[in-house]
Amino acid sequence: MDSTPSVERVWRTWAVKHGLDPEHIADQAHGRRSIETIRAVAPELDAEKENIEVEQMEIDDKEGVTALPGAAELLAHLPADKFAIVTSATRPLAVARLGYAGIPVPRYMITADDVANGKPSPEPFLKGAALLGFNPADCLVFEDSPAGISSARSAGMKAIALQTTYPAEQLQDAHAIIGNLADVKAILRDGSISLEFAPLSLAQR
């Protein structure tokens, strides 16, 4: 889903409250657990306390949270036991945003609550693969942030970047870059999934 407007509003508001650079903070927040963003940009603050406040602000701010093109259609087409959402949001926030975007909560989901180290650590995606019962090398990740791409690659997975949050030049560590999930066609054959898409560019491998 596209939660960029909400993320940026919340983090800019939080930054101003603490006398920090709103643009810098908003840029740092994408694709990372909020508590890790707070620890990185304001180590002098009580991260646990601030994180509770930020999370509630994000849950309350639903304006502009929408499904990205093709997301609902692709997920509805995939078997429920073949994919997981791996997100830097907490479970309450992820469930709220899925609801705002009109996307059903999937059977399998790894959230900020399930890991000790968020993206760019490989832990979130490794736990996602384990949850599905797959080897990491057999998993394909769609990501829209540099931290998420780094996480996926560190986990030994192929990473396809979505150019929905960051420009292509910041997504070059992905194996390929596409516009959005509307560019992806899933074909199911004998229990296997084939994905077809035309990349905008091939990044480093």
Image: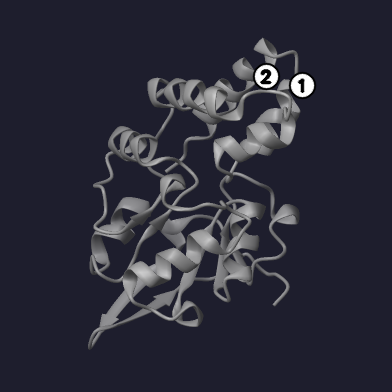
Q: Position of residue 91 (x, y in %)?
A: 36, 41
Q: Position of residue 59 (x, y in %)?
A: 39, 26
Evaluate if marks 2 and 1 touch, with contact meaning CB atoms under 8 Å apart. yes
Residue at image position (59%, 56%) is: 148
Secondary structure under badge 2? helix
Query: Hey, which quadrant is residue 86 in on the image?
Result: bottom left
* Residue at which label 1 appears: 21
Q: Is residue 12 above or below residue 145?
A: above
The three-letter code of the residue at mark 1 reads: Asp
Q: Nearer the viewer, residue 15 or 47?
A: 47
The three-letter code of the residue at mark 2 reads: Ala
Residue at image position (57%, 68%) is: 159
Mark 2 nearby-residue class (10 Å; few <14, some 14–19, many ≥20): many
Residue at image position (23%, 65%) is: 80
In this orientation, does residue 184 appear?
A: no
Looking at the image, which residue sits at the far bottom? Answer: 190
As drawn, the label of residue 15 is 2
Residue at image position (73%, 31%) is: 41
Query: In the picture, which quadrant includes the C terminus?
Result: bottom right
Q: Nearer the viewer, residue 20 or 53?
A: 53
Mark 1 nearby-residue class (10 Å; few <14, some 14–19, many ≥20): few
Q: Position of residue 129 (x, y in %)?
A: 41, 71
Position of residue 142 in the picture relative to residue 32 (left or right)? left
- Mark 2 vs mark 1, CA separation in Å: 6 Å
Q: Is residue 107 above or below residue 64?
A: below
As drawn, the label of residue 80 is none
Q: Nearer the viewer, residue 153 or 188?
A: 153
Query: In the picture, which quadrant includes the N terminus?
Result: top left
Q: Position of residue 51 (x, y in %)?
A: 53, 28
Secondary structure under badge 1? loop
